[in-house]
Amino acid sequence: QVQLVESGGGLVQAGASLRLSCTASGRTFSNHAMGWFRQAPGKEREFVAAISRTFTTYYADSVKGRFAISRDNAKDTLHLQMSSLKPEDTAVYYCAQDRGLSLGRPENPSEYAYWGQGTQVTVSS
């Protein structure tokens, strides 16, 4: 049984930094691409970042240069370092694990089979 558990969310002021983590279990972590998505109230879930099995990274334009995704295969953990946070970054952040096939479109939620429960990030102005 695959489990993804996010942590690290919170309430911060604009310009601050936060580091999200996602601990995975149930499958060999290093064999799978991982992604971060977010969903703000009243909006659809949107892609934030992804990292492949070979550590290739992908970012949404809105976070490029401010967020950094990384993975620690020894600890089965995914991270998202968020800097220069803006009020528009406020959302529930979800980590996701791919289906085990080649990650064709990392920004497409359908590429991912498993999702965490989410962690709230609130950025005040």
Image (cartoon, helix red, strand yellow):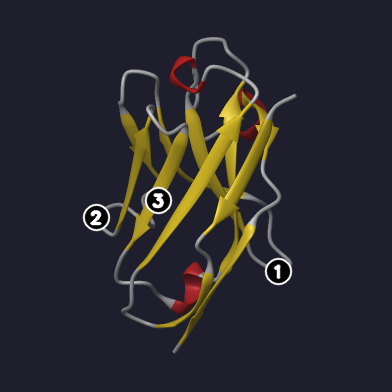
Quadrant of the rendered structure where residue 27 is?
top right
Lower position in the chain sequence, tag 1 or tag 2: 1
**Residue receiving disc 1:** 41
Residue 58, compared with residue 5, is above or below; it is above
Position of 49 relative to 105 (above/below): below
State the residue lying farthest toward the front.
Answer: 75
**Mark 2: few, some, or many residues within 10 Å (few <14, many ≥20)?**
few
Dot placed on the residue nearer the N-terminal end, 1 or 3: 1
Q: Could you say which disc has been placed on residue 80 in the image?
A: 3
Residue at (36% x, 50% y) in the render: 61
**Side (left or right) of 101 relative to 57:** right
Q: Find residue 122 and report its horizontal and vertical position in percent.
A: 54, 76
What amino acid is at disc 2?
A: Gly
| Secondary structure category for the residue under label 2 | loop
Callout 3, which amino acid? Leu
Q: Nearer the viewer, residue 59 or 21?
A: 21
Q: Secondary structure at mark 3?
A: strand
Which element carries disc 1, helix, strand or loop? loop
Residue at the farthest left position: 65
Left or right of 41? Residue 93 is: left
**For mark 2, what is the residue?**
65
Where is residue 20 shown, x and y percent of the image? Answer: 46, 56
Whole-Å distance between the Cαs marked 1 and 3? 21 Å
Q: Residue at x 52, y 45 (%)?
A: 22
Q: Earlier in the sequence, mark 3 or mark 2?
A: 2
The alpha-carbon separation of the residues under discs 1 and 2 comes to 25 Å
User: Mark 3, residues whose alpha carbon is within 10 Å: few (<14), some, or many (≥20)?
Assistant: many
